[in-house]
């Protein structure tokens, strides 16, 4: 790392949004309509206002993208523009640059006065299943403890096509889903509210560069197509899932909601937290051979707050536990010629670590309900109850550089 960067904007200590982060979101306030912004400390840099200052005019990029109410058009400008723009924002916010300071009142908005919106239009959503510990735990519970991983698992990043229409931003209430389930030892299903509502702690990457139908993305340059990452809660109804998933996989037990954190952290901001790829112990086909550091050391946690009680951290894990990395996932996704579009989202799959405290779902934390968790206020949980709030957070920290994702926080409401 070169000389430490400082910003003239106040950055509270332990802020996720340092000058090394500069994540993108869409926000509004009482007098500013939906627009793109960048989080810095406890403020948001209003990109629509910034584009009117003249300070971006020499960047040779269409500034009309900041008049939009979504980030898709900005992302579609491609990686060289993302880089050029990020370098300029870094410079304008650094202590060494005085150009933006006179416009501070116009371009900075307190996050406390802003409402965050869904930042992108998600055309397609794919969910992978790339944590070995999670796949092993689920395999042990539902199939064969001796052969928990299925034969394909170490040869390809298993995934399925999810539902994009129900991806919502942090803060959106999650209504408990209704559906078909089969009671233990019954021969016929019943209809009703899911009783085994769960979260899945995941990270999602966002596609920023499209491909044409028939084109394949190489594992070596897959990152050119990835704009950034977000926290992702893949809400799951375990009882609906269990009855419906044979033989074609997840459907209504998953499609009722997934929620994301409001800020998209650019991939470049995660560079300080790169580590060697996961040591895969089975040789993969050449199209999946990934060289370099495409794994990230990011601390992740899940907290649960019941309606009246205080928050309890129920899981602490790390994105580094992913067996398959984002380049392998994207190379595999497109190896058959399936095209991707700007705004598509790919989630990692539940991120579980090796210890019981690091599991990324209630299914695993309570081991199918056999080991209830005790919350700080004394209440117990096997799965998520009505009026519970689930909060996920994540950040990287290395050599004094901190880059965080904020949080994805959603409250569960009863069926009405
Ligand atoms: Ca999932």
Image (cartoon, helix red, strand yellow):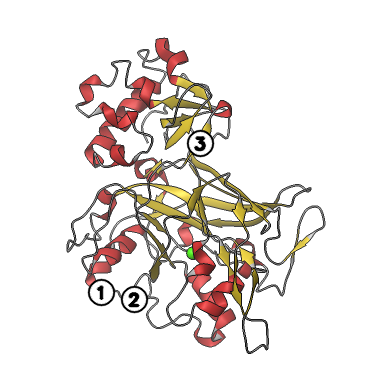
The image position of residue 64, as x and y in percent, is 27, 28
Compared to residue 232, the image places residue 73 above or below, namely above
Compared to residue 316, the image places residue 243 above or below, namely below
Q: Residue 285, which numbered label? A: 1
Residue pointed to by mark 3: 116
Residue 392 in the figure: left or right of residue 129: right
Q: Which of marks 1 and 3 is nearer the N terminus?
A: 3
Residue pointed to by mark 2: 155
Q: What element carries label 1?
A: loop
Q: Which of marks 1 and 2 is nearer the N terminus?
A: 2
Assess whether mark 2 and mark 1 are in contact (beta carbons under 8 angstroms): yes
Residue drawn 32% across and 42% down? Answer: 72
Count of numbered badges drawn on the protein = 3
Q: Is mark 2 on a helix, strand or loop?
A: loop
User: Between tags 2 and 3, which lies in front?
Assistant: 3
Q: How far apart are marks 2 and 3 (CA)?
A: 40 Å
Q: Distance between the residues labelled 1 and 3?
A: 42 Å
Residue drawn 70% across and 53% down? Answer: 388
Compared to residue 167, the image places residue 160 above or below, namely below
Crowd around label 2: few <14 · some 14–19 · many ≥20 (10 Å): some
């Amino acid at each position: 790392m070169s000389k430490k960067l400082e910003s003239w904007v106040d950055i509270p200590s332990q802020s996720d949004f340092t000058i090394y982060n500069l994540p993108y979101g869409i926000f509004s306030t009482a007098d500013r309509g939906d627009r793109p912004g960048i989080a810095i400390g406890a403020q948001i840099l209003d990109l629509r206002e910034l584009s009117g200052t003249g300070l971006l005019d020499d960047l040779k990029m269409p500034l009309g993208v900041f008049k939009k109410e979504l980030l898709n058009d900005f992302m579609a400008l491609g990686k060289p523009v993302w880089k050029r723009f990020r370098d300029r924002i870094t410079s304008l916010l650094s202590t060494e640059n005085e150009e933006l300071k006179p416009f501070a009142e116009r371009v900075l908005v307190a996050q406390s006065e802003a409402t965050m919106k869904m930042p992108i239009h998600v055309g397609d959503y794919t969910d992978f299943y790339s944590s070995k510990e999670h796949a092993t735990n689920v395999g042990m519970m539902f199939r064969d403890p001796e052969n928990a991983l299925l034969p394909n698992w170490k040869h390809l990043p298993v995934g399925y096509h999810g539902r994009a229409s129900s991806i919502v931003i942090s803060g959106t209430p999650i209504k408990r889903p209704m559906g078909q389930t089969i009671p233990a030892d019954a021969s016929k299903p019943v209809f009703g509210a899911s009783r085994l509502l769960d979260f899945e702690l995941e990270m999602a990457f966002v596609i920023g560069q499209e491909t044409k139908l028939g084109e394949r993305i190489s594992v070596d340059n897959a990152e050119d197509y990835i704009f950034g990452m977000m926290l992702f809660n893949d809400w799951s109804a375990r009882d609906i899932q269990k009855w419906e998933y044979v033989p074609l996989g997840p459907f209504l037990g998953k499609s009722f909601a997934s929620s994301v954190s409001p800020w998209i952290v650019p991939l470049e901001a995660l560079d300080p937290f790169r580590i060697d790829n996961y040591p895969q112990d089975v040789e993969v086909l050449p199209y999946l051979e990934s060289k370099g550091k495409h794994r990230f050391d990011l601390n992740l946690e899940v907290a649960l707050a019941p309606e009246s009680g205080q928050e309890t951290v129920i899981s602490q894990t790390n994105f580094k536990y992913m067996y398959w990395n984002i380049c392998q996932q994207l190379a595999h996704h497109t190896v058959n010629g399936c095209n991707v579009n700007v705004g598509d989202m790919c989630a990692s799959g539940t991120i579980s670590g090796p210890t019981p405290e690091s599991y990324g779902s209630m299914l695993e934390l309570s081991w199918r309900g056999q080991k209830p968790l005790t919350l700080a206020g004394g209440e117990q949980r096997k799965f998520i109850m009505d009026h519970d709030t689930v909060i996920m957070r994540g950040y990287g920290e290395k050599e004094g550089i901190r880059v965080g994702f904020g949080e994805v926080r959603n409250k569960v409401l009863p069926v009405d």
